[in-house]
Amino acid sequence: MTAAKNFDLEHYIMHHVRNSNEWQLPFLAPIKLPPFISLHGFMMILGSLFLIYLFCFCYKRNQRFPRGINNFLEIFVIFIRDEISIACLGKEDGLRMTPLFCTFFFFILGLNLMGLIPLFSSPTANVNVTGALAFITLSLMILGAIYKNGFIGFLKAFVPEGVPFPILFFLVPIEFIGMFIKAFALMIRLFANMFAGHIVILCLLGLVALLGAVALPTVILAVFMFLLEIFVAFLQAYIFTLLSALFMGQMYHPQH
Amino acid sequence: METDSTFNIFSPEVQVVILTWVTFFIVLAILYKFTWKPILTALNAREEYIRRSLEEADAARSEMAKVTEKCNQLVAQADQKAKEIVAQARKGAYEAAKTIEQKAREETQILLENAQREINAQTEKAQAILRTESVEIAVALASKIIEENLDTEKNRKLVNELIKKL
């Protein structure tokens, strides 16, 4: 530990995971970003452009038998449509909401995976980004339910059937707060998974910086963490999409 | 740049939140227009196509089974008919042969009877001729022997009686 030469691991890690106003490139001066577009915002825009490129230019329409990238993308779209959207929201609403969930999934997946590419960072490791996404889900839970069932119908979702009247005094506030907690949990879950993954990788690599060549084997661990992170990126995108659909479905069809 | 002591992972950054919404909805709009709608339409069309193709295949299969069954039935019918025709022809031929044989037998019989009758007639005729001639020879011989003693008529009677006794 004495060989650390004043190396501040915490500073080193936090410097890598936090938002800033400049994009640091090796051997080059950091690129200053406009104040409104911070580093995470910039990464988000890059990720979105890549998504649009992938879907608008790589996806070949009018292909009768899907091949290559078409096949790959269609597998995800079919899965989201059938297993997430229609399964949670029913046939009619499910089909209508599929584009939203597809966008959720690929948007989050793209941003998650960005953090794994050197030089880029992951916007989903920023709580503001995940919060904004979770807020979209929350708004759709509330507005969609009001649109679909009317304001009274929306309120009825907080009153479970078959419960004795006095219990409702406790249950209704819990149900009401629960709606916000669900969205809050969405935000924290995605953020924490991404953030923690980066922290673990950076800690393992930071050991090398801290202890020197003795700690080189930790690089192997870091590689395994990296592979795990790829899996987690897919998993969290899937979980966020699935839970969004599930929560919306609960609000749209309160009898379930 | 803020120092680490003031850095908080939960620090709100309004511009990031707003930027997230803006980016997300722009991406949603663009992808909706150019990707999700075409993909979903294409998927529906393909599913519909596959469903219809399968139905058509089923229909074709059952149609084929029906046709095959009919074919087999027709072949069986034809076979049956052919057998019947052959059997009938054989029976007809057998009967024709039988009638021909019968006729031939009858004709043979008739011919035989005719021949028999002819033979009998000729025999009787020959006997009669022989009888008369022998009588006349006998009479002639007798008249020569007794030299006109007896009446020709009486002698003939006598000779006839003698012949009958013989």
Image (tube, coloured by chain):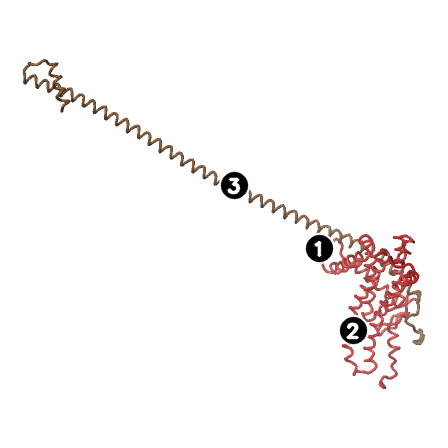
Chain colours: A red, B brown
Question: x%, y% of residue A84?
Answer: 79, 59
The N terminus of chain A appears in which quarter of the rendering? bottom right
Q: Nearer the viewer, mark 2 or mark 3?
A: 3
- State the separation of the CA atoms marked 1 and 3: 48 Å
- For the C terminus of chain A, the image quarter is bottom right
Q: Residues within 10 Å of mark 3 (few under 14, many from 20)?
A: few
Residue labelled with disc 2: A225
Instruction: Point out which mark residue A123 bears.
Output: none
Q: Disc 2 vs disc 1: which is toward the camera?
A: 2
Chain at tag 3: B
Q: Chain of mark 1?
A: A
Amino acid found under the numbered disc labelled 3: Ala
Q: Considering the numbered disc 2 on the image, is that residue within a helix, a strand or a loop? A: helix
Q: Nearer the viewer, residue A63 or B129?
A: B129
> Which secondary structure, mark 1?
loop
Are discs 2 and 1 less than 8 Å apart at CB? no
Provide the residue designation for mark 3.
B78
